[in-house]
Image (cartoon, helix red, strand yellow):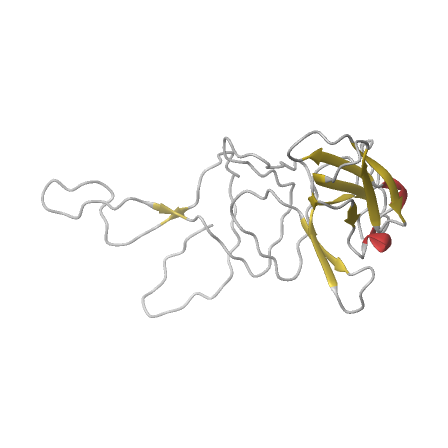
Amino acid sequence: MTFVPQTLGTQNCTDPVVTGTPSTRFDFIQKFSTNDDVDPDPIGGFEPCTPYYYGNAQINTLQVNTAITPIPACGQAGVTVYTGASITLSGNVTANTGTFTVKPFNIPHPTKEGKRLVHACLEGPENGVYFRGTMKDCNVINLPDYWDGLVDIDSITVHLTPMGCWQDLFVEKINWGKQVIVKSASGGPVNAYYTVNATRKDVVPLPVEMDEGDKWPYDA
């Protein structure tokens, strides 16, 4: 940018273009202050304040002309770095600092009119959902009433962990994607923790391995 001296009391309302050689440094943008000496003044002047840099920014219309590579802080778990991704932003965009460790989704309820279904995703090689809980002196797991509209019932699997003592548990049958019937080979009561997993049927199956250049099936 070229700075042109102006006469006091006049205005220069032009919109100048920034030119020059692009810097190759990765530095924070300095936030300038006023009335502070650049260097300590040994003869009674102001001591310099600790400098600030811009840690937050807002631009009404944001245009990015090149790929963005987020740089995670050392030791941050659960951070995915996207390198060379094409990013398009439009409308109101809000970005929050911190580490994103959950992937929530909000979809129309598959079986209840006017309702929304909100879940958070586990990571795995499928579009999977889970349901977990505790069985106490009973042998039936009642699955959520929306599961028959959300999941492929043939994909349902059940993990059982006996509580208190060994009970020789097994899944006798799964009724229509709505109930899991658990039995104990010893004939005693069932007391167990359970986790039921299934694959969603309302979305395109997850392409676990893709070739470079393959179309991402979840693009609008």
**x, y (%) of residue 183?**
81, 38
**x, y (%) of residue 137?**
71, 45
Residue 22 seen: yes
Q: Quadrant of residue 185?
A: top right
| Extreme residue toward the left, this view | 43
Q: How many labels does the image show?
A: 0
Q: Nearer the viewer, residue 109 or 175?
A: 175
Residue 213 seen: no
Residue appearing at x 25%, y 43% in the figure: 38
- In the displayed structure, would residue 22 be above or below residue 2? above
Relative to 161, 219 lies left or right: right
Residue appearing at x 51%, y 50% in the figure: 18
Q: Nearer the viewer, residue 183 or 147?
A: 183
Relative to 210, 121 lies left or right: left
Residue appearing at x 36%, y 62% in the figure: 6
**x, y (%) of residue 25?**
48, 34
**x, y (%) of residue 5?**
36, 57
- In the displayed structure, would residue 180 be above or below residue 109? above
Relative to 53, 80 lies left or right: right
Q: Nearer the viewer, residue 119 or 34?
A: 119
Q: In which quarter of the image is residue 184?
A: top right
